[in-house]
Image: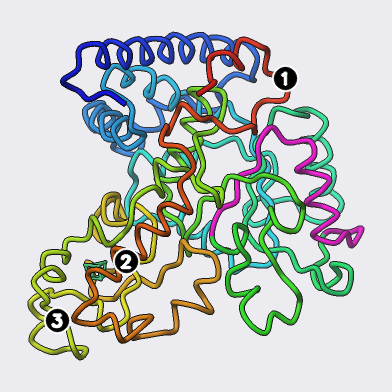
Amino acid sequence: MGTARDPLYRETVKKQYEEWFSHCQSHLDRMESELPPPRVELQEALASQGVSRRDFIKWTTATTALLMLPPMFKPLVARAAEQFSRLPVVWLHFAECTGCSEAFLRTSYPNVDSILLDTISLEYHETLMAAAGYQAEQNLEKALADFNGKFVCVIEGALPRGLDGKYLTLGPKGKTGITLAKEVTSKAAAVVCIGACACYGNVQAAKPNPTDAAGIGEVLGIKTVNIAGCPPNPANFVGTVLHYLLFGGLPALDSIGRPVWAYGTRVHDYCERRPHYDAAEFVAEWGDAGAAKGWCLYKMGCKGPYTYANCPKVRFNDAVSWPVMAGHGCIGCTEPGFWDTMAPLEKPIDEKTIGGGEKTVDTIGKVLLGATVVGIGVHAGLTAIRHKDNDNADETSHKA
Ligand code: SF4
C-alpha cells in the first residue's frame, strides 16, 4: 500500500474518489426520478426550526468528514440530505423499551440530524402512527405493496424464539414477531437494526434469557446493518441512511454488522481521559479527588478499552457530552452480550490488568480489532444489501 507522499498513490486515490463522485451523482439523479417526491422541503423545515443555511453548511462539512469522505463530497451530502424524506421507511418494534425511538425523537433543541429524522417518510411506525388495529395492519400491507423492494426496514427490539415465537405477538391477527419480521424483511431493500436489542438481543437475551430472545440477524439468518448502542447515537443512523442515499448501497460493515465508519475505532483511543490512563491517574472511588480532576475511570469499570464506537468523537445531545465525559465509565453497549459480560461490572474485566493494564488492554484491543474489522475501505466494500432493483451499473461502481 502506498503513502500520501507517493504521487502514484495520490493519483490512484484521486481517481477512485472521482469515480465514486460520478457514481453518487448519477445515483442521486436516478433516485430523484424513481422515488416519490420529497414529502418535506428540507430547507423550509430547517428554517421553520430556526436552523440557518450557515448551520446546515457546517453540518454538511462535519457529516462529510464523519462519513470519511473528502470535502469534494459536501455538495452531494447536502443533496442526499434533501432526499431524506423521499426514502420510504417501515419501522418495526419487537422486544424493547422504545428507548431508541425516544432518543432519536426527543432532542432538547432541533439540529439538522433531528430535523432529518422528523422528515423521514415513515410508512409504518407502531409507536408514532395514529392508526391502530386493522387500520394499522392495512397501512403496513399498503406500504409493502407500494414500495416492494424499495423501502428500508428499520427494526427496534429483539425477537423471542421461545414457544414458537409466541412470547411476542402483534396486531389484530396475532402474528408472532418472527412471522412479521420475515414478511417485512423479505420485501425490504435493506434491513437496519437500531439499538443493541435488535442487533444482538441485549437485555432480553441476557442470562437466563427465558424467552430465548436474540438479535434479528441471528433469528432470521439474514444480513443486517447493526447500528449498535443502548441507545445508539442518532448521527450513526442518519449517516448510514445518507450513505445509502448517496451510493445506493450500504457502507462497509465489520464482522458483526456495524458500519466501519462509525464503529471502526475503540472508545479508549479517542477518550479525553486517555492521557490520565497513560499517566496511571485513575479514579479509585466515586467522588474522590481523581474523579473531581477528570481522571481515568478504568478502575471504576470503564469498558472503553474493549468497546468499538465513535461516542467520544460524535457525543450525544448535539455533541454536548457522552457518558465518560459526564463521569461514568463506558458500559460497552455497542458490543454483543455486554449486559452479561460488561455492564454490571463496576470494576475492570480482569483486575490483574490494573497497573500493568496498558499492554493487556492494547492487546485485547488489537485482537478485537483484528477479529472485528473486515476490510479497511469504509466505502469501497459496500455490502451485499442493496436495492433489489439496482442495475448492473451500481454493481460495477461499488466493487472494492
Ligand atoms: S479506560 Fe475509559 S475513561 Fe479511561 S481512557 Fe479508556 S475509555 Fe477513557
Name which residue type carries label 3.
Ala
State the image coordinates of residue 356 (x, y, percent, origin top left): 21, 78
Examine the image and state in which quarter residue 14 appears.
top left
Task: Name the kind of residue labelled 1 in the image.
Answer: Asp
User: According to the image, label 3 marks what residue?
Assistant: 291
Instruction: From the image, tell me which residue sits under label 2.
Output: 305
The residue drawn where x is 39% and y is 18% is 76
Q: Nearer the viewer, mark 1 or mark 2?
A: 2
Q: How is the image coloured?
A: rainbow
Image quarter of the N terminus: top left
The local crowd at label 2, few if under 14, some if 14 to 19, many if 20 or more residues have their Cα within 10 Å, is many
How many residues crowd mark 1 within 10 Å: few (<14), some (14–19), many (20+)? few
Instruction: State the extent of the magenta-drawn residues as a range.
Output: 171-195
Question: Where does residue 33 sit, x and y in percent of width and height?
Answer: 61, 10
Displayed-image quarter of ligand 1: bottom left
Is label 2 in a helix, a strand or a loop?
Answer: helix
The residue indicated by pointer 1 is: 389
Is residue 63 rendered to the left or right of residue 33? left
